[in-house]
Image (tube, rainbow, N blue to C red):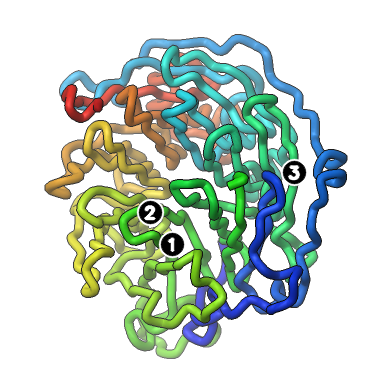
Amino acid sequence: MVGAIPKSSMRDFGRPINQNSNSNLKQEGNVPTSYTSTTAARQHAHSKLTGAVWLAAMLVCTAVSAVAQVQPCQGPGAPMTTQTKCLTAVVIPGNPLRSFDISWVDPERAEYYLADRSNFGVDIINTKTLAFKTTITGFIGIKLNPNGTVDNNHSGPDGVVSHGKWLYVGDGDSTLKVVDLDTGKIVSTHSTCFTTSNCTRVDEMALTTDGKFLLVANNAEDPPFVTLFTANGAGLSIEQPAWDESTQRFIVSVPTIAENPKNCDYGQTPSPSPNAGPCSGAILVIDPTNIEHEIQADNIHPLIHCGPNGASVGPNGNVMVGCTPGNQPGDNETTIININAKTFRYVDVGILTGSDEVWYDAGSGRYYTGSSAMPGGAVLGVVDGETNFLLETIPQSSRSHSVAADRRRHKVFVPQGAPLSIVGPGGDTTNVGQQICGTMRGCIAVYTVPHTPEEGE
């Protein structure tokens, strides 16, 4: 991830849409159309996909049909004293898990989705039976840097979100791919790259509750930008967005902004002050129905000593943002901010930091964090949604940064990387994942969470 959002570019988000007919947001069948927030992108009219082109562009994906293994959990990642219990581990067939990104649960379909770069696709697990179903392939997979490490900015798949039978997946070539889950096929592909020839990944994304609007982030561009799609028949970067039903707004994590605090160093050369500390981040609030009006600086709300990655909407108008020392050196807390109050009051959850993806589970009333940058090693963090107190942390493999929960079935899913000795750079440097998985291949750890009958309803 490169670059930051300088103060002069904050107002680029959501400048007025060109008033020609090709740039207005509109829906054509089930294919999303889009508006991208950068100036360069606005100079390119998005071509409309007709029904014939949409049909001709369908990609037939190969489904992995091998049977996945289910293993009992062991070791420090399966403690007996925590309320959150490791139930089992699902081993994905194919290549060992070297690199993966965001995960998602659709409780209505009872399915868990993982962006599995190691196997060039999206893994699907049945959250009722915990059985592996298939891998939808057709994605970029792992790209390597010259030194042999994983090039996250060009690998894919990355961000994942779903609504109904449609699965939206970001890929490493700056494309958004739309999957029909009923057929397991990629039915359309949309580029968000209009500014450079070296297109980077479409990363995290968020959908409105009705599935009408989809917001995706190109986090590795400089400057980074977001693209708003109508969908479903319905520098550092920009990170995980979330949809807040109560305010009808997208909440977007911005790891770093200029002048927060004044004269801070966000990576520019030269730095404004030799002794300047690093800049903190912010949350960006976007109204998808009013995107034609320029988003003012009032929509950008600075955070204090927090460079956020993940964002998840919890109860009472609160949003958890996953602060991480990877964005703001010295971060040792996670912030929960109230977006209903105009003052944007916040509380800090101490001794929990380094989260990429965070997830609020309404079934248990708890936040879960994929905290892979904790000083003592990666953990699954558990925070009470009402009190905002840290309840417990559970050790995970060193690359475990992804987490998703099924609120109906009271299960939390955490991918575990395969050991370094098996997959090389990017692999687990501890033995935690190996013990959880019962194998050297990596797995999806499945945790059960406490709940009451009322919470189940």
CB contact under 8 Å: marks 2 and 3: no
Of labels 1 and 2, earlier in sequence is 1
Image-quadrant location for residue 360? top left
Image-quadrant location for residue 67? top right
The percent coordinates of residue 383 (x first, y second) are 21, 43
- For this orientation, the residue located farthest to the left is 387
Left or right: where does residue 457 sit relative to residue 434? Answer: left
Judging by the rendered image, the residue that carries numbered circle 3 is 188
Q: Nearer the viewer, residue 433 or 455?
A: 455
Q: Nearer the viewer, residue 243 or 332?
A: 243
Judging by the rendered image, the residue that carries numbered circle 2 is 311
The percent coordinates of residue 192 (x first, y second) are 70, 60
Residue 446 appears anywhere in the view: yes
Of labels 1 and 3, earlier in sequence is 3
**Residue type of the residue flagged with mark 1:** Val
Q: Nearer the viewer, residue 370 or 317?
A: 317
> Is residue 165 shown above or below 367?
above
> Is residue 41 shown above or below 445?
below
The secondary element bearing badge 3 is classed as strand
**Residue type of the residue flagged with mark 2:** Ala
CB contact under 8 Å: marks 1 and 2: yes
Instruction: In the rendered structure, find residue 381 and report the number of the disc placed on it.
Output: none
Tell me the residue at 43%/62% (across/down): 252
CA neighbours of label 3 inside 10 A, class few (<14), some (14 to 19), many (20+): many
Tell me the residue at 68%/57% (across/down): 33
Looking at the rendered image, the disc whose residue lies closer to the viewer, 2 or 3, is 3
The percent coordinates of residue 213 (x first, y second) are 54, 55
Image-quadrant location for residue 99? top right
- Considering the image in quadrants, where does the N terminus appear? bottom right
Instruction: In the rendered structure, find residue 252 and report the number of the disc placed on it.
Output: 1
